[in-house]
Image (tube, helix red, strand yellow):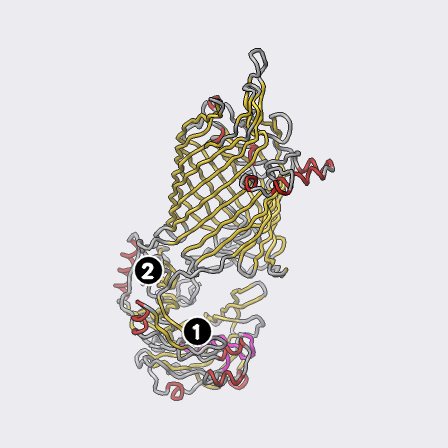
Amino acid sequence: WNLGSSTPIVEDLQAPAYRPAVTGHAHMHELEPQVKFINSSFDWSPSGKQLVYAVNKHNRYGEDYKDLFIHDLASNKDIRLSQSARLESPAWHPQGLGLVAVQQSKGTQNLVWSALPDSQSWTEQVTNAIEDKKPEILLDEWENWTSFEDGRTIFSPIWHPNGQQLYGAYAYLGERQLFSLDPEEGTFTPLTAANVDLRDPFVDSSGSYLYFSAAPNGRFNIYRVALNSTGFPIPGRMEQLTDVVGGAFMPVEYDNRLYYSEYIANGYTIRSRPIRAISVSENELGFEWLERDMSRQQHTAHTAHTAQPNTELVPSSTAQLSQMNPSPIAALNYFDDSDLTTMPEVAWAYADTGSYSFDLPTIGQPDERSLRRYTDTYTQTSFFPLIRFDNYTQRNGRNGQLLKAGQFGDIGQNLWRDMKPGVYMASRDVIDRLSIFGGIMVGLGSKSAGTIGEFFQPSRLTELDRDIFFQAEYRGLPFIQRSWSPTISVEIFNLHRNVDDGLSITEYPCTSCLPDTARVDIGYEIWQADVYFRSKLSRFSLLELGVGYSPYRVSTDNFYSRELKAFITGSSSEYFKGTTLSAAYTFNYYQYTTDSDIAPLGFKGYLRYQYQPSKLLEEYEIKEGSLVPIFKNSRNHSTELHLRYGFRTFGQQAFQARVRGFSYFNNPKDSFYTDYVGGFLGLRSYPFFAIGGSTTAMTSLSWFVPIRKKMNSQIGPYTLDKMYARLFFETGNGWYIGDSKTVPDKIDSGPSLKSGIGAELRIATSAYYLFPIKFFVSGAYGFDRFSVELPDDFVTPATGNRVNYGGEILFHFGLTFDFELL
């Protein structure tokens, strides 16, 4: 509702358009918010046609400031009123004369005022602004109504209906207290000076009562005090309106009913009740209203230090605090830092070229301080050991089949072959401008060794399977001082893979002999270096431009040629070399909810285009006793679209639809360029290489069901937060568009869609109260059974080149920072 005017925002909450948000609570309704991201008080115009509020937005330099906006109800548009002004908690004058707001500046807060034109002129300005592409009515002149320099904070200013008195709450060295301000006389008048927290003032439409929230017994409840003709509280005329356990805040009176926010077990909720008042005395609450003459003490609003709250418990000096010998927390609570002021101009002059030294009394630490320009300061490098198991070799067959057969020795050999111990490292500067992240993992069993000495031979160690990566990000180019100044990311990857009998060479031992095949062990060495420029277009989207260079090498071991009757020396040569130019648009309109990390709601996705001129090894020829590579040139254009959309269904359950499509504009002539949609990041009911093509498409529908929320269980440094189940259905396939005969080594899974279902357990945790840790385990079953004939060059765990997929349960599990990696 708009309780401050005659224009209701919601006329009837019992109407069918406003359905209950919680089953069994007919008074609770789910409404679409008209303005989002408000985190301070707001106010209505006298006409009830506009809402004035403050919201945090970045300016053209990418700096975030709170500024004032008005929301016009008729047009549903927002109009900017200030630019980089650090304003919040606006209050509209009851007669529309202007706006008062709280302004942050130099470590303290003050009340400022900006006059508005008459009603007709203001309406014309609003109408004209709405028609602009970027609606704004910038109020450049803000007059200071207070000029505090002592670090106090001001909350929730609100007008008396006559427009001659302003009320609010403020805090200075203790609990919040209430104040009034007379704009005409320029006087800031504390109304209370108690050891009780008082906040959220509100004056009813008749100006008879001042409503507020107070916690005299540790529980916040709603009270009111009668006001005299000058707008000051009348001692002895105070009443209590609520008696709740969790706390009652933000009172509003309308039509003899009280509306307020109450904190209950499930969070904050809005309550409404008829006003039933119980008289209470100041003695019962433990404080008294200050008499007007005593409270003002001839202090004007422009005085830096006005009347202070009760500070009997606050030591008068650091020395006195030391004599009290309080606990560290109490010492911080009682420490008097009112002497802190802004740095003098001379300090900034010294700091501009060198360093300015000064003393600052500090508990438990040296008093010496210095002011200087920021220089790069980095956090201590963190190291995270890990062990990873890859299953791309499975030398003795699939682990699941070996487990069923009880062949535990063969399983052990598979695990030793595919185990990769390693370490991650990370560091960043303290302002998060530069961050680095890297890691290395090595497959110790990927090359055989007969002895311990051979195991540690440098030549063997350099040929082991390995994964190395390094990433460095620098936010914002220093010579581009704009919000879109790109983040530069440099990424380097190196992978090495050994394949037993990975190369087959056809030979003819003699003129009349049948062809013979010689098999040679090979090793693949992959390097990739990428540079990306990522520019934020808005809070929700960014543009990415990238360039990458990828040289891949293959090395062969020595082997004996029966045709040449001689040993052929192993060689190393490039088998792929490509340059990738890419452009991508990414957006993220996920909603901010307590469960957004585990059951996201909203729209998210990206669209990417890539151009890749490259050379690919086609075959080898034996010339003059050596293997000579033959290359084939390609120029590939491709695009990829990936979308996710999550929505709430009923209760705390949610659904998410996911769509992913990829296609080449040309038709690559080699299966090396195949795009795959199976595996963990795609269709989990089929292995990664099971489904692919030059054009691929997949979709999935997920259902998220909460199992347990607000777990708050501690296991060492880890805190368990919530547990969800995810049930999903997925379908997709890959095709070779055009003349498929031009891809002789294609891996064709057939034209029909491949479908499957699965279930996943998700557990959201945090480590050391800082790092989000996500654990998941999933099982998926593929409905469609099919077989793929692999080219002769492929190496498989089983005999023959035909591989069967589908009709089996595939498991995935992991520990990551996010459930959605793409």
Would you say residue 197 sits in the magenta stretch? yes
Q: Residue 369 lies in what quarter of the image? A: bottom left
Q: Residue 584 lies in what quarter of the image? A: top left
Tell me the residue at 37%/85% (across/down). Answer: 296
Give, as a three-letter code, the residue at label 1.
Phe
Indicate left or right for 726 with 428 as reference.
right
Q: Which residue is mark 2?
A: 80
Tell me the residue at 50%/82% (across/down). Answer: 195
Give the magenta range: 195-219
Indicate left or right for 280 with 448 as reference.
left
Q: Residue 417 lies in what quarter of the image? A: top right
* In the depicted structure, whether residue 240 falls above or below residue 720: below
Tell me the residue at 58%/19% (across/down). Answer: 516
Rendered location of residue 690, percent (x, y): 57, 32
| Quarter of the figure with the N terminus | bottom left
In this view, the residue in front, 813 or 295, is 813
- What is the total number of numbered labels drawn onto the structure image? 2
Q: Which residue is mark 1?
A: 202
Tell me the CA gap for discs 2 and 1: 26 Å
Considering only order in the chain, which callout, 1 or 2, is on the residue closer to the N terminus? 2
